[in-house]
Image (cartoon, helix red, strand yellow):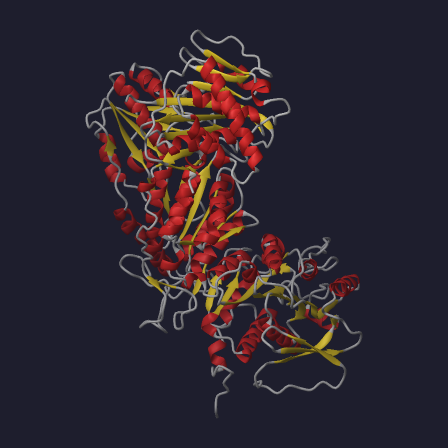
Amino acid sequence: MGKFDYVISIGGAAGQGIATPGNILARLFARQGIHMYAYNAYQSIIRGGHSFLTVRCSNEQVRTHGDVIDLLICLNQDTMDRHLEHMRDGTAVIYNSNTINPGEPADGVQLCPMDVKELAGKGANKLMQNTVAIAVACQLIGVEFSALEDVIDFQFSGKSEELVAENVRIAKGAYDHSAATFQPASQQMPTGGEALAVWTGNQAFAMAAAGAGVKFYCAYPMSPSTGILHWMAANARELGIMVRQVEDEISVICMTIGAAHAGCRSMCATSGGGFALMTEGIGEAGMMEIPIVVVDVQRAGPSTGVPTKTEQGDLWQALGASQGDFPKLILAPSSPLDGFQTIPDVFNLTDKYQLPAIILSDLLISDETSTIDPKLLDMHPIIDRGELITEAGEEAGSYERYKFTESGISPRALPGIPGYEHVVASDEHMPSGILISDEFTHPHKRRAMMEKRQQKMTGLLAELPPPVIMGAPDAEVTLVGWGSTADVIQESIEQLAAEGVVANHLHFKWMVPFHSDEATELLSSCKRTIIIENNYTGLFHRYLRGETGFTVDGHIRKYDGEPFKPKHITAAVQDQLAGGDAISVPYEEIIV
Amino acid sequence: MSIKLNVIDLPKDDYTGGKSTLCPGCGHDQISTVIINSAWENGLKPEMVAKMSGIGCSSKTPAYFLSKSHGFNTVHGRMPSVTTGAAMGNRDLTFIAVSGDGDSASIGIGQFIHAVRRNLDMVYVLENNGVYGLTKGQYSATAVKGSKKKKGDINKHQPIDLCKLAVNLGCTFVARSFSGSKKQLTALMKAAMSHKGFALIDVISPCVTFNNNDESLRSYTYVKDNDLELHAYDYIPTYTPIEGIEIPEGEFHDITLFDGSVLRLETIGSDHDPTDAVAAMAALHQAEIDNKHVTGLLYFDSNKSTAIEDQCLVDTPLADVPDEVMRPSAASLEILNTRFRGKD
């Protein structure tokens, strides 16, 4: 069996029910063991606008939405008008011929008009065009009708039996019509794979936190982080997690701090605007040495920005979160799975080193649906709460919350333990917790406490894996990235290899503390370096240069709200290798 | 001489705190003394008390009482939400919070409102003087209109009355007192500690440095002379009290508090019914018109559920629930995965 790699795009207005066919396709593929990655380009609107869902499926692991469209499903005229031009020889376009004029396709594009009135019957619900479209799409790529029927049953479970039966009947009519009328698609979907699960990055992060023993989660709804809140709220009761929707992000972070202080593993999530409100609290957790985990799901900013579009724009906001100079842990996972596997470590590290952790996610990671092999998911990772005092011991009566130690880590007693009473304060303090901010200010005491806190970073850095170069050691060019661009860079490297260009990959996840020496050494060993970022000014490059003194040779940047496609990076690398400009800004052809 | 012990056999020394660094004569120190006496006489377990505060003169005072309790000085105005989180994490802690008018009526007013709305089980002592002391005496949002502090112009702005706000929000215990009325404040403080739910005591506590001049409507003398007491109060605990209780001569009626103790309201002048929210608003409104300070228990409601009860939390504090219990089981993971796959 050859490689199956097929991209279906569905376009329509918000409110036309684009999510339902998307979910049906996702489930259908997952059940057949077909890997799937869906990217939904949408807008901050309940009804109207243009939503464009791209579902890429393959019999191999797939983690980007790819470069092309093989099958276009138009739910409205707008979709036809916008995207017909992207369809090339061997592709197909499905549309409702009652309401949509097809326009002029390129040679070799199969138009598949659906007479929805005829197929669905008079008086059928408007949403039935979705069922017709999905049935035709399934038929074209060779999905057995029984598999589609199963998923329709599931999708509409909870609705009336009549509705399910009507959808199945209409789907069957459309499926048979397609078989009799249209040519099969250029690729046929293989069968027989073991069923996969479907998730989003937000769900992955939430599940990871649950597995790591989070007992308290709170949030103020903010796109694109809301999926974490939804998952937490939906599963809170079953999993025993205290979940709260709170009045604003200031209260969110403070409640998180309060719950963490009381002894619960605590997390909150937001996007850049909410994170801005939280920064005061990040400093509070830093000063009080309270372990909390904050997820910033970046979206295109500044200010309200573009709530439904992606960007890697918040790095410096995270670096500079809160006034003062204090230890914090900052990381940017590269994918839902990477986040899932890393988050338990993040909780262990924040507990051990008693500091705030900031996880930089972004819309691309958080919101997109993809398949995952459930066997890769360990819901019972090791929990290490560090030096936590939960019952009275020898130090009762003489306990010092901020005791000076070699590691800088002072054992943390939870409130409520006799003999371990102490004050935690946003003011600077002595080892006992007594404030030195007003009457007792003392430079030597301040210095000692600053050094104690910062000493923790030495131990923390030693626990973080240093960066490594992935791929050919003597590559002609090294592609440098951070966070969510890892998978698209990987795919571009494969494309470059096919073009005879040997590229390798240096990707950064751990931002603070940073392995400066190792990074400098690696970068210095590269023949040529190009850095890829979803922002305008090369935020990570500026940080990297600060930490290493190293300046890369070229940049590929995108700041139009849409994520990179592999071909964007491939073309830009080729251009730069051929002597083109050192800064490439790929053109986005899909306008949504 | 034998040392007096309270109902849990602790001397008063176990409830005192560090030396105050506030200005000599500050009303806040009186309030600290009342907190010490009330906590001792009510027999609170010091190690189970969390003293919560924000930033400002008032918020420094937890250092001056209950040094054997836990303290949490949050950043400015954020104490209510930190307390909410801490209460969710450990429902067994007793929260005694001290805040000021800058903390609660300006930078943290949203936080105050939401804590009241949730009926978080805590004592919320507002040390209210109408000025920002630590930053040298600017007016705060509770400054009385027409009042003049030591330096600067007459205040032209309508004050925010946090008692009115609290009554409006359905706060379950709303009292106003005066730092110079030790007997009244002590009875109210003890009652607040015995209350289940959000207990606000707005204590007019004159700033001796910046707002104690003759033109001020918040000076010690002005407040003392214009204090309209709703009732005289006695707190009657469930155990034999350390100090004897005077039996009132006139009319009185009792309010039974959550822990079984009683707040006895003796009628002086016209009788105020603290279960009547409209009467509470009327009393506050009239006092404002007359440039008076109405003190006493304004409003009381023992029937509302608390934030913790609304969340249906387990009896064990969340922080003490072992990870084995809290973490998702293999079975619940399997349910989740099944759901993702869409097969049941």
Q: Is residue A195 among what the camera can see?
A: yes
Q: Position of residue A424 (x, y in %)?
A: 44, 62
Quadrant in the picture for residue A367: top left
Residue A575 to residue B283: above or below: above
Q: Residue at (73%, 54%) from the top-left corner? A: B158
Q: Position of residue A206 (x, y in %)?
A: 42, 45
Determine the residue located farthest toward the top in the rendered image. A107
Determine the residue located farthest toward the left in the rendered image. A474
Quadrant in the picture for residue A332: top left
Residue A342 to residue B234: above or below: above
Residue B24 to residue B57: above or below: below
Residue B131 to residue A84: above or below: below
Q: Image check: A558 left or right of B127?
A: left
Q: Image check: A303 left or right of A550?
A: right
Labels in figure, total: 0
Q: Position of residue A44 (x, y in %)?
A: 56, 32
Q: Is residue A535 among what the camera can see?
A: no
For the N terminus of chain A, which image quadrant?
A: top left
Q: Residue at (61%, 78%) from the top-left corner? A: B261
Q: Position of residue B251 (x, y in %)?
A: 76, 82
Q: Residue at (31%, 17%) from the top-left corner? A: A574
Quadrant in the picture for residue B183: bottom right
Q: Image check: A361 left or right of B157?
A: left
